[in-house]
Amino acid sequence: MKSMTDENQTWHPVALGVDVPAGVTRAVILNGTEIVLWRGADGQIRAWDDRCPHRGMRLSYGFVRGNSLNCLYHGWEYEGSSRCIRIPAHPDLEVPKTIKATAHAVHETGGLVWMNRSGTAASDPPAIAEGVPLISTAIDRPIGALRDLFRATSMHPAVIREDILDGLSLLLAMHPVSERKSMLHALTIGGSDAPADRKRYALAVRQLRQQAETMAEAA
Amino acid sequence: MLKLHDYVLSGSCYKVRLLLALLRLDYERVPVDFHPGRQHKSAVYFALNPLGQIPILEDGPLVLRDAQAILAHLANAYDPDKNWLPRDGRFGLIMMWLSFAGGELMALSAARMHDMLGYELDIETARANGRKALRILDDHLADRGIDGGQWIVGDAPTIADIACFPYVALSHDCGLGHEDYPAINLWQRRVRKLPGFVSMPGIPDYF
Amino acid sequence: MARTTDKAALDNWYVLGALGDFPTHTVKGARLLGADLIVRRAGVQFQVSDEVGAKLPVEQRYGHLWTTLGAPTRPIFAMPEWDEPDRRPVYCGAVRVRASGLRVVENFLDLAHFPYVHTDILGTESKPEVARYQVEHRADVDEVWATKCEFFQPKAAASADGGQMSQYMYRVVANPFLVMLYKTPPTAPNRWDVIALFVQPVEEDLSIAHPFMLVIDETSSDAELIAFQQMIFLQDRIVLENQRPRLLPLQPGRETPTRGDLSSVIYRRWLKEKNIRFGVEEPVRLAHA
């Protein structure tokens, strides 16, 4: 089976879109780098380095107002493009255009938020089937351990499709957090939309989590 | 007049301060020099609470210890609409989560006391147990979300949410962020939007 | 981590705690600049010994226990307010922070965060402007002073009843981990309250802050004064623990100061001149702008 290493893979799934609604920040970690995801009133999702260029405060502690992300420390306001447009301590200052947060390419598709830190001209963002978001869960194992759980080939290096019974498929998007941790963002295609059934699907994902965590560490 | 023996940095006291604010109740706050004074372990305070802990609520002749018990008393005595502690099928579930808030979730309090005030304890175990408790709550909130529910029990906030909120929101104080807990991230924002919400140091006012 | 080799950091007097933090007739561990120390108290006598049992110099000053791992060229700084009879000393209790001690000091010097971190207490969002102030390095005592600082404060102190325009002065003494501020007390506008933060650098990214105050206040209880100061410091702590990098960057271009950050600009320049390395970020390769 052909496999793609993470170094080659530039797009990573980092959240379910519904987990970052308008007005909300969400801190995530991608391969050890702290990232802030946030969505403005315009519905646009952004993925930036989780660091304000002023004094290094994590922007994920900040607050979204309209289409701007404001840093908690001194209230510096960053518009959606990542440019700083207001410094409250100096209300009359025209903020130099060079002051900006570090933005990354981001794309929402298939109910997932994907980001690309490679900085090179971003390749085409992934195109996967549209699933219904189920749950997102952290797993205390590296991504390699997750891959070992699945035999199915994938529609994308990061996404495994597991066809279960009753016309239900689970889409499991794998997100490398660090050397010791990963996250699984799960969606469904087909199956039932009754809450009782969907909670059973969620339980199945958590059972995969438990399997991954109780597996012996790779030799 | 309600009287609360309180410490500004205590998450347990904050559970009570928060419900008092949400219920819009007036009260007298008696500051206790918890650190460095350890006033809660003084003879005067042991007489009020043999466990030597705060919060302690005085309501007329009634003296109550234990944040969870105090929340239940306030909801019982001062919420005639029974929103915060409904007496129907939700009652047992609320008790279950109150017990969790005063039990498993308190690993976060221990880890916080170690990281913040240098308390000597097994920090690795406290942090690991704290993470386990956070995961249990996150899984539960995700399931509630599947049900279309936004609160720990039922369709409206109850004292289950108030009891669990402080140490979850303060988990950063002991090095545990919410990156692993997407459902908690959304739930704690809902709590902070409740009318009358008050914050505490360690929980930024802006979000 | 073992004891640092950074001479600029070692050759200073540091606080290990308020005298009351060490119960009498006990032995307590302490960690300073990576070195594990033992503090023994017998009545009013203190002894501090290092990793190999050697006795270190010890001083009791301003109600605190001081020691050094090196050879300081200056005595412990002067604080004449200590001798004023109507002042209350308030020991606010040690707090651990997972951050470089230099970041802790720099945050203490900063005004612009008041409306956002200490909302409706030390500042309010409707009045965020930081007016020009003055900063100088006083070479004779090797201290950095910021003066003529002013900020509107809804609740400047525990005893405050309503808002005031607070006047501030800041002072970092020769040991750059020790900082204090002077501000106008609500009840005595012609004097200064002293609020100090004695930072004990434990490891490069771990510090213990010992907050201490000498205030003019006849009405507040100790518990109220301590609660107010702890509230402020714990509001800062969540910022301190979430600044990246954890160690203070001295390299140009790593961070972006503005005019309101003059204190921090002068402080960082002074740290470079002192060649302090403990708690300072190693230079990194910067991405192109």
Image (tube, coloured by chain):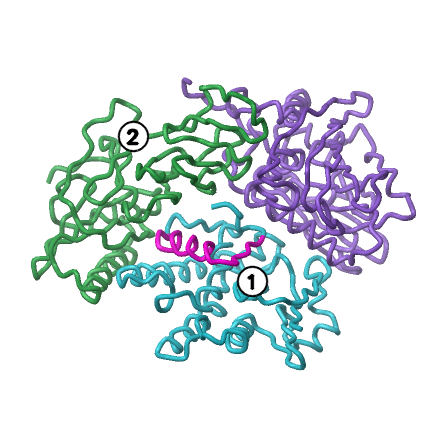
Chain colours: A green, B cyan, C purple
In terms of image quadrants, where is residue A55? top right
Label annotation for residue A105:
2
Q: CA distance from mark 1 to mark 2?
A: 43 Å
Q: Residue at x 54, y 64 (%)?
A: B15
| Residue B131 pos. (x, y %) | 42, 57
Q: Residue at x 67, y 82 (%)?
A: B61
Label annotation for residue B21:
1
In terms of image quadrants, where is residue C287? top left
Q: Is residue A158 left or right of residue C124?
A: left
Looking at the picture, tell me which residue is in the foreground, B50 or C158: C158
| Residues beneath discs 1 and 2 located on the same chain | no
Return the residue found at the far bottom: B61
**Range of the magenta residues?**
B181-200
Secondary structure beneath dot 1 equals: helix
Q: Chain of mark 2?
A: A
Looking at the picture, tell me which residue is in the foreground, A203 or A47: A47
Indicate yes or no whether the magenta region holds residue C115. no
Q: Residue at x 59, y 52 (%)?
A: B116
Q: Chain of mark 1?
A: B
**In the image, residue C87 above or below residue B47:** above
Label annotation for residue A145:
none
Identified by mark 1, the residue type is: Ala
Crowd tier of the residue under label 1, counting other residues whose Cα lies within 10 Å: few below 14, some 14–19, many 20 or above? some
| Residue C256 pos. (x, y %) | 53, 24
| Residue C154 pos. (x, y %) | 67, 44
